[in-house]
């Protein structure tokens, strides 16, 4: 939401919060149906429908706050991870793209469906098909991450070096006391705000036509696509015996990729103009790295119209879905089986089915706009005071709003774009985050199987027990092609192994996310104790090279203040800044591998793939009661496990795998993984006054009380940490360029087995604990003194960062469990009959009927802000609410 508190827009008042982001939605659904009885045994159902779905994201965009400014100022709140993309900025109205971007969607879906049902002997045949044609129009102002078609200057520390102070020009600019207190990011962001340091300038241009002609700033990109869908099916429900029924089915679906009327869909190509396939690109990058060679070819972007292809990805034609199911009701009148199974009182069911998902409109229509071309993000990640864009900056030469002018440096785009377009090459501007569809993208495939036993205990009581499983493949996953090739091998050692050995020497055991030996020994002694690593020696040219000089390359690397400064506020090993370290290595004059990164072309090159997978298994038990002395109920207990490579909806962007070469590194609990779920619904209608007449019957009969209980175990949660300019973004080098907006699921790991439990604890004021001789306040910023841990300090000290080369996984979406929770809702109802045909029902519905305070999971669970560690500041459920209703029926 965009909110104006500065009275900046017409009709708004200073000091009053006014929303400036209406979200209108319009829709219509028209259906025409014809059901025909063609014969006593054959019926036909024909349906035609038209669905119109229109919505708009409307805002005031990002106008500059003051006259003369070249762009809107987006000031980072203190305490963030260096980026200004936040609604908490100290400005009259927020200008962060996620809340100020503009979009329109106009979808028109036309569908024709025909279903036939034919009874033939013991068979019930069902067959039919569907044809659907969807037209989708979309326009947008942004690239899905942090950039839109308005010029914005992020006043944030971003990639500004704070290691160029003092007489030598190599000392840290952060006071030692600030660094020791763990407040470096707060300090750098406050400094950026006070001095007006431009950490990033950015804008997106839109282009049109086959020549991709530049459009004025503020012009939105457009897409008009048509998608066709065809399906057919046949099913046979065959009653072999009175006690045995078999169901067989087969269906087929085919969905065309979107066809844009002007060929305005952006594809990723290589230097020869051939499409880039994600799996082949990753395989080539890995093979080259293992051989000690760089593989970072020049990549380009070209529209489907200029490529003369119809589709942005290959049509999937394998949508065959078989189905088989069986239901058997055995009959045993006597003996042990008669007691266990009974006569017609037990049903055994089992089956298997395959289905395919539909590809969301986000990936079919929105994503093809996100590669450079139709939208061209232009950024300057290192603004300089001389009005140019550089490759690095410091406090001494970074552009400052005011002292250096009101218009920060930002590259100018060309009038047209060549096809293919190679950003960052031949004087072309470097692109921002860029996303394209993988040519091998396909719909999700889900295999489902189940087995259940249903037993009638009595006329009014039954239970059912069963198992179900799901195996999902071809799941949506975004891949950053610029991830660090950690398997790069030189001198007989991989980069990952060299990194792990340096981290171990410097930082082991890493309590509380700190660099242990650095804290204990101090910078000089800790670095001196690190053994030379063959990879760094070979990669940086060895002793005598221009970078290493007379020392070993390992020592030269570690003694560089851009790698580890005097206070440790910059420590590329201790802060697990793998991508930043790799970028630093690539920038050294004696670097032996040449170009290994794609960030010289774009802050990120992401491909939308279908490489993810997941598995789900569940056992359940259901108990049903029907009108037993006025009581009806159904209760269900489910014990399940949901595992996968990351539960990400198709509408998401910028979420990456931890390790793009090893999906198993991201395989773990899904966000919705709940081990235990219990639900129980009851309805009691007192039978005592049933049938009573007169005033007594009207007053006492017709009452019912219906409570509903839900209880469940906790959701997966994890302990996070900052990696300087970003969080959960570079522990394994998953985001090659930390100026991009991407992240992965990355959690801290326990040093010894975690046994602290997951209950809400009261009267926990927090404490100060000495970690490596440094006093750290843990959980002390907590006025409610409610914490998920009884001793948050000992828990924090028992966790460390996830380290490349040592760990193979970082806990997926979370390696801990949140709080168990329960709730009861209820309804009280009274039926009144006025006449035989007229009556009324009065209801009182309660949510959280017991007004139960269910604490939520902690809002802050990160090693980087220990003072807030584990604190609970909110509740899952709102306080008790009541709704009174009445319904008259006649």
Image (cartoon, rainbow, N blue to C red):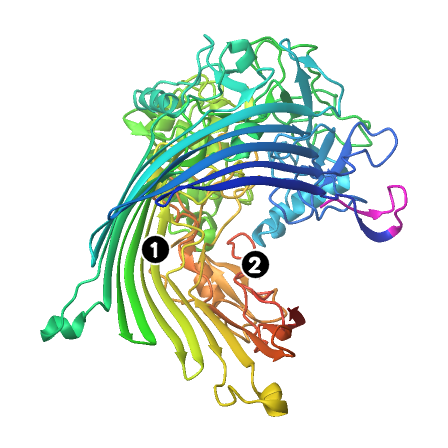
**Hey, which residue is sitting farthest left in the picture?**
335
Q: Which secondary structure lies at badge 1?
A: strand
Gap between marks 1 and 2, in whole Å? 25 Å
**Hey, which residue is sitting farthest front in the picture?**
40
Residue holding disc 2: 859
What's the magenta region? Answer: 1-14
Determine whether, in the image, residue 156 is placed left or right of residue 514. Answer: right
Foreground pick, 832 / 140:
832
Vertically, is 425 above or below 579?
above
Vertically, is 263 above or below 528?
above
Task: Identify the residue at horizontal 59%, vertical 9% (top origin).
Answer: 426
Vertically, is 743 above or below 392?
below
Q: Nearer the viewer, mark 1 or mark 2?
A: 1
Where residue 739 appears, x then y in whole percent? 58, 32
Residue holding disc 1: 641
Q: Residues within 10 Å of mark 1 (few under 14, many from 20)?
A: some
């Amino acid at each position: 939401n965009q909110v104006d508190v500065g009275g900046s827009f017409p009709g708004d008042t200073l000091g009053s919060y006014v929303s400036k982001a209406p979200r209108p939605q319009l829709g219509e659904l028209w259906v025409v149906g014809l059901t025909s009885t063609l014969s006593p045994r054959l019926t036909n159902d024909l349906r035609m429908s038209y669905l119109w779905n229109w919505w708009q994201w409307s805002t005031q965009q990002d106008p500059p706050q003051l006259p003369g400014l070249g762009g809107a100022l987006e000031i980072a709140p203190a305490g963030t991870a260096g980026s200004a993309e936040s609604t908490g900025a100290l400005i009259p109205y927020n200008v962060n793209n996620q809340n100020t971007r503009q979009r329109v969607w106009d979808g028109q879906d036309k569908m024709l469906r025909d279903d036939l049902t034919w009874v033939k002997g013991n068979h019930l045949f069902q067959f039919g098909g569907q044809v659907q044609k969807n037209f989708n129009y979309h326009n947008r102002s942004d690239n899905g991450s942090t950039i839109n078609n308005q010029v914005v200057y992020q006043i944030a520390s971003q990639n500004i070096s704070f290691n160029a102070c003092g007489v030598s020009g190599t000392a840290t600019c952060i006071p030692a006391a600030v660094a020791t207190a763990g407040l470096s990011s707060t300090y750098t962001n406050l400094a950026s705000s006070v001095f007006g340091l431009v950490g990033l300038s950015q804008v997106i241009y839109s282009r049109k036509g086959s020549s991709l002609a530049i459009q004025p700033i503020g012009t939105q990109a457009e897409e008009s696509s048509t998608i066709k869908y065809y399906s057919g099916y046949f099913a046979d429900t065959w009653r072999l015996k009175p006690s045995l029924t078999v169901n067989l089915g087969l269906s087929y679906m085919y969905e065309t990729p979107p066809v844009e009327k002007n060929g305005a869909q952006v594809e990723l190509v290589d230097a020869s103009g051939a499409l880039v396939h994600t799996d082949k690109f990753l395989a080539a990058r890995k093979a080259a790295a293992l051989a000690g060679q760089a593989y970072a070819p020049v990549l380009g972007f070209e529209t489907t119209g200029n490529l003369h292809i119809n589709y942005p990805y290959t049509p999937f034609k394998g949508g065959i879905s078989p189905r088989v199911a069986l239901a058997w009701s055995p009959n045993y009148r006597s003996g042990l089986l008669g007691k266990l199974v009974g006569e017609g009182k037990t049903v055994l069911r089992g089956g298997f089915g395959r289905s395919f998902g539909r590809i969301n409109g986000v990936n079919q229509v929105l994503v093809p706009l996100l590669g450079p071309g139709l939208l061209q993000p232009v950024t300057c990640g290192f603004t300089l005071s001389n009005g140019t864009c550089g490759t690095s900056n410091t406090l001494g030469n970074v552009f400052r709003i005011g002292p250096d002018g009101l218009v920060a440096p930002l590259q100018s785009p060309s009038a047209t774009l060549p096809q293919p377009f190679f950003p960052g090459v031949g004087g072309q501007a470097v692109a921002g985050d860029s996303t394209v569809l993988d040519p091998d993208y396909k719909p999700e495939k889900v295999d489902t199987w189940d087995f259940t036993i249903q037993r009638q205990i009595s006329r009014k009581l039954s239970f059912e027990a069963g198992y179900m499983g799901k195996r999902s493949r071809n799941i949506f996953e975004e891949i950053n092609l610029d991830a660090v090739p950690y398997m790069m091998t030189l001198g007989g050692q991989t980069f990952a192994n060299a990194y792990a050995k340096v981290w171990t020497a410097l930082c082991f055991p890493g309590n509380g996310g700190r660099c242990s030996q650095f804290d204990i020994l101090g910078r000089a002694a800790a670095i001196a104790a690190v053994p030379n690593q063959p990879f760094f020696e070979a990669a940086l040219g060895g002793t005598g090279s221009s970078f290493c000089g007379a020392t070993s390359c390992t020592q030269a690397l570690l003694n560089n203040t851009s790698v580890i400064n005097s206070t440790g506020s910059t420590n590329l090993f201790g802060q697990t800044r793998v991508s930043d370290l790799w970028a630093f290595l690539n920038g050294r004059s004696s670097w032996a591998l040449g170009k290994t990164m794609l960030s010289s072309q774009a802050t990120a090159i992401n491909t939308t793939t279908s490489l993810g997978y997941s598995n789900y298994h569940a056992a359940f038990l259901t108990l049903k009661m029907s009108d037993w002395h006025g009581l009806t109920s159904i209760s269900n207990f489910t014990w399940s496990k949901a595992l996968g490579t990351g539960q990400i909806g198709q509408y998401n962007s910028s979420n990456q795998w931890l390790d793009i070469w090893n999906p198993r590194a991201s395989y773990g609990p899904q966000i919705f993984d709940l081990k235990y779920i219990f639900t129980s619904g009851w309805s009691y209608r007192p039978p005592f006054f049933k049938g009573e007449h007169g005033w007594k019957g009207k007053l006492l009969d017709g009452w019912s009380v219906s409570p509903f209980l839900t209880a469940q175990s906790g959701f997966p949660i994890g302990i996070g940490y900052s990696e300087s300019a970003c969080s959960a973004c570079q522990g394994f080098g998953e985001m090659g360029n930390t100026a991009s907006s991407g992240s992965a699921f990355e959690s801290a790991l326990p040093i010894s087995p975690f046994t602290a439990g997951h209950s809400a604890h009261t009267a926990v004021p927090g404490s100060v604990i000495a970690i490596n001789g440094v006093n750290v306040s843990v959980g002390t910023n907590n006025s409610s003194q409610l914490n998920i841990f009884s001793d948050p300090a000992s828990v924090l000290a028992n966790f460390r960062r996830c380290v490349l080369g040592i760990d193979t996984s970082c806990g997926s979406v979370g390696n801990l469990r949140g709080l168990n929770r329960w709730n009861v809702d209820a309804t009280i109802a009274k039926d009144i009959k006025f006449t035989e045909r007229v009556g009324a029902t009065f209801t009182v519905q309660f949510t959280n009927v017991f007004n139960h305070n269910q604490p939520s999971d902690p809002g802050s669970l990160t090693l980087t802000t220990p003072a807030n560690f584990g604190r609970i500041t909110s509740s899952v459920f709102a306080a008790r609410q009541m709704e009174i209703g009445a319904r008259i029926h006649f």
